[in-house]
Amino acid sequence: MIGNIIKKEFKELFVLSTLIPIVVVAIAYGSVGQMIGNVGERMEEKPVIGIVDMDGGDFSDIAMSVLIGRAKVVYDGSDAEEGLEEVRGKNGVALLVIPEDFSQNIYANHPGEIEIYWIMKGAGMMDSISSGALEGLIQSVSQEISKELIQQDSSLDPALVLAPTTRIETTFFKGKEVEGLSPSQLGNMLISQSIVIPVVVMMLIILAGASVISSMGLEKENKTLETLLTLPVRRSHIVIGKMVGSALVGMIMAAIYMIGFSRYMTSFQSSDINLADFGLALGVQDYLLVGISLFVALLAGLSLCIVLGTFAKNYRSAQALIFPITALALISAFIIMFKDFDTIPAILRVLLFAIPFSHPMMAMRALMLDNYPLVIGGIAYAAVFTVIMIAVAVRIFNSDRLLTGSVRKRVAPRKPAWGLRR
Amino acid sequence: MKAVEVRELVKDYGNFRAINGISFEVNEGEVFGLIGPNGAGKTTALRVIATLLQITSGSVTVFGYELPKEAGEVRKIISYLPEEAGAYKNLTGKEYLNFIAKFFGDGEKFQNIVQRGLEISNLGERINDKVDTYSKGMTRRLLVGRALMVNPRLAILDEPTSGLDVINAQEVRRIINSSVEAGVAVLLSSHNMLEVELLCHRIALINEGRIVASGTAAELKKEYDAGNIEEVFVKAIK
């Protein structure tokens, strides 16, 4: 008996329409993971650096031996400009300059300065793996010098013995020169753009998308769709009305969600750093572009949802149709959190650009770095996508498909099924 | 002017022919009934005339407007009540009538439409309750009110008393009759023979997508030498 019930439940639930989204998403996640690469492997990779040793003293020798042993040194010369170019050309992470008075300063009870010229490629979490490895290496240099100072039994200040080096850092990031910050500090400053905004957009798309797809499912389940379609109102107005209504619901729900989430995220942010001090502030026109990007992306997402919603047979099947939207929103958000648009493989870049709601996730960060073509291109793409999807939705609304679904090809002999009632 | 003119209408779903070349007319101020068994093509015919389905071949005009070319104009003068229609469950009955009425007029016209809807549905204080709390009979009365409150020139009613008890069914038939007296043309489908004889001025018997006989109930009974419409149908499809 129980087997019979299990069999019925399985047959009812395990249908192609619920299976396909899962398979597509599984393939998508697998592909994204493959393309982004293995974090573990990347952490074990030696950081690619250049070194300019202008000191040649005892302590710079220690530093050189540590760095040469544990990093891939692509430049070891005396010209900082040339070294920087070489490191850039070899896709390296930084050029380290040890100034001529490095050892002398340490012997004179002053910390030895190491100038670090970072080349930051992206602001995603995974983009800072190489710089993180080099930071660890510089820490090792400091430790080795400390050991040497202890072995020499010098009468230096214990505080200096424990921290014999200091860093003077400059980060080059997409044409901007940010003085006094390492890539990890800069990445932390951009956490709002890297994590908070993708999550906000993701939630907005998922919640508003779920509303519009559910609305289509409910129209069918509650048998209200036929009445709606015979009212004197244009099909395009029905489509747009559903989209805007769902967008409002989605925005309210996302706002409630974000109140909690933003408070959670503020605990990770450094409050004493002002982005404007580093030339990373946005102007009024930039915020306007972010707003337009978000609005157009929301419309694009909802227009896609309404097309998907036309396939819903009822509320339950509508829930399954939300899955592809959720997956696309999650994939976009995760890629943008972990990697920068410019540092992902080309095929992933195409995928990310093709997902219309990925653009507002990237917009703020891109505008800070003056990448206007990406933002404006994204807005144009999402607008075209919206128009096409609305046209497709209106076409479906004008067709039989909305009411009859897909019709299996059959030619069955008809038998009257007369219901005799008096 | 004819309320509805259907000529050689064919409707296919893929390879399945649901309607196979039917022709009929509905006059102004007339109740015309399409009767037949389940799957005969009644609902499909009504959905085509209600602008919901595309025409495979043939022609359909409603008060001179041709489908599908002038579907927008047709929607302004018709009202369609599907067999299994529902209303938005999170709205109250009044809110639902307001929602529909807004498509048909503003200001005083809107108020008049809603007032007529309230009178036809006759749900008393319950009109202010959510539709979700209504019984099947109450929902159907609300929907009949919705369909007829807009004073359509043509009301297309698919099984208007479907699932209703005798009292509610009688009330719905009374409402339909009073609308017809006010000049509304009605095209309805049913497989309830008694209802059809009570309501319709003329009848078309439909089976396997074809009209097998049509006329007034009296004409059909005389032609087929039958005591009732049910008997007429059995003889007509033999």
Image (cartoon, rainbow, N blue to C red):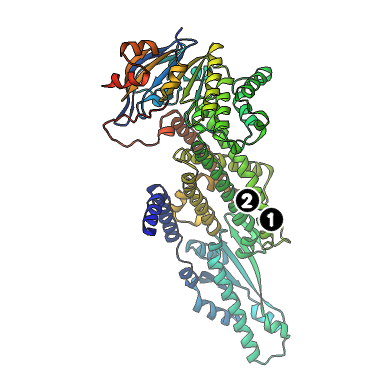
Crowdedness near tag 2: few (<14), some (14–19) or many (≥20) residues, C-alpha within 10 Å? many
Between A385 and B123, which is closer to the camera in this rendering? B123
Which residue shows up at 43% across the image and 21% down it?
A: B194
Q: Which element type, helix, strand or loop, lies under badge 1?
A: helix
Q: Judge whether B33 appears above or below A187 on screen.
A: above
User: Circle 2 is placed at which residue position?
Assistant: A368
Quickly name the residue at label 1: A275
Pick the quarter of the image with the C terminus of chain A: top left
Residue A400 sits in quarter: top left
Where residue B154 appears, x then y in whole percent?
50, 16
- Mark 1 nearby-residue class (10 Å; few <14, some 14–19, many ≥20): some
Q: Residue type at mark 2?
A: Met
Foreground of the two, A368 or A119: A368
Q: Which chain carries label 2?
A: A
**Element assignment for label 2:** helix
Give the chain of mark 1: A
At horizontal 66% and vertical 21% (from top left) the residue drawn is B115
- Give the alpha-carbon distance from disc 2 to disc 1, as whole Å: 9 Å
Labels 2 and 1 touching (C-beta < 8 A): yes
**Above or below, B225 relative to B39:** above
Residue A95 in the image: x percent, y percent? 56, 68
Residue B196 in the image: state x and y as whole percent.
Answer: 43, 19
Q: Residue A165: where, in percent of width, then height?
A: 66, 77
Q: Using residue B173 as the reference point, say whether residue A16 is left or right of it.
A: left
Which callout, 2 or 1, points at the residue further toward the start of the chain?
1
Q: Tell me if residue A138 comes above or below residue A305 in the rendering.
A: below
Q: In which quarter of the image is residue A246?
A: top right
Q: Is residue B94 visible?
A: yes
Disc tally is: 2
Q: Residue at x 47, y 48 (%)?
A: A320
Q: Nearer the viewer, residue B184 or A269?
A: B184
